[in-house]
Image (spheres, grey):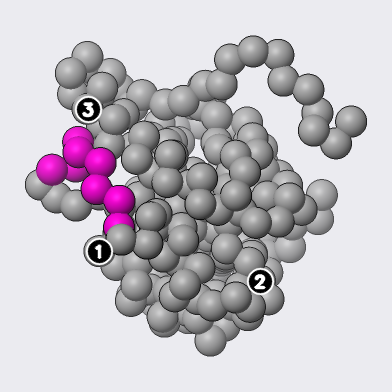
Amino acid sequence: MSIGTVAVIGGTGQLGAALAVRLARAGVKVVVGSRDAAAAADMAAQAGHDMLGMANPEAAAAGDIIIVTVPFAAQEATLRAIAPHVAGKIVVDTTVPLVPPRVMRVQLPPEGSAAVRAQALLGDGVRVVSAFHNVAAHKLARDEDVGCDVLVFGADKGDRAVVIGLAEAAGLRGLHGGALENSAAAEAMTSVLIFLNKTYKVDGAGIRITGELTDPDA
């Protein structure tokens, strides 16, 4: 699958940096975006793999596919900043609506999910897909099998398939999760996983779908 250039917005954060490095290691051309262009450039240079770093809007303009990896509190401002540069593109929103200090309690936004909120903020001309909610960033940053599935949500099956390809390039198993509205389930599950981590002292609990799955395109 030809993926093109992937721009990781918020790419100096834990999840963004881990995804950027994994994708670059797999041969994907990656641009790292940040509110601080210098920080993005430093991160890209240190990571190697011929990655480039720049401010979020410029990174979004340079990317064919955009992955947004910012905290819920920064979601609206970040999406508004990149909106002029993402028309017609796939924007992968990884946002989980965690509201400190009660991050172990599900607190979905009025729109129903962060993904639906992202679509409303970006408008119908942007192909929003949501994914990577339940992957522990610190485990993803290590060069090892994370042992976690990625549920991918979006209105268009073809767009979901592209993001599944990204997940697989990052060494994860991506699975179709259905409509964008279904993202609420994965977003909510993150709070449950945080609770499990604390209660059972787990080093980054994740989700693995059991059963023998068949190719949906077969």
Please tell me which residue lies in front, 136 or 210: 210
Q: Which mark is residue 89?
A: 2
SS category of the residue bearing label 3? helix
Q: Quadrant of residue 61?
A: bottom right
Residue type indicated by callout 1: Ala
Residue 61 visible to the viewer: no
- Residue 26 in picture, x, y percent from top left: 67, 44
Please tell me which residue lies in front, 11 or 165: 165
SS category of the residue bearing label 1? helix
Q: How many marks?
A: 3
Q: Which mark is residue 73?
A: 1
- Residue 115 in picture, x, y percent from top left: 46, 58
Residue type indicated by callout 3: Phe
Q: Are marks 1 and 3 in contact (CB under 8 Å)?
A: no
**Relative to residue 67, is residue 206 depicted above or below?**
above
Residue type indicated by callout 2: Lys
Instruction: Identify the residue position indicated by label 3 in the image.
Output: 195
Q: Residue furthest bottom?
A: 84
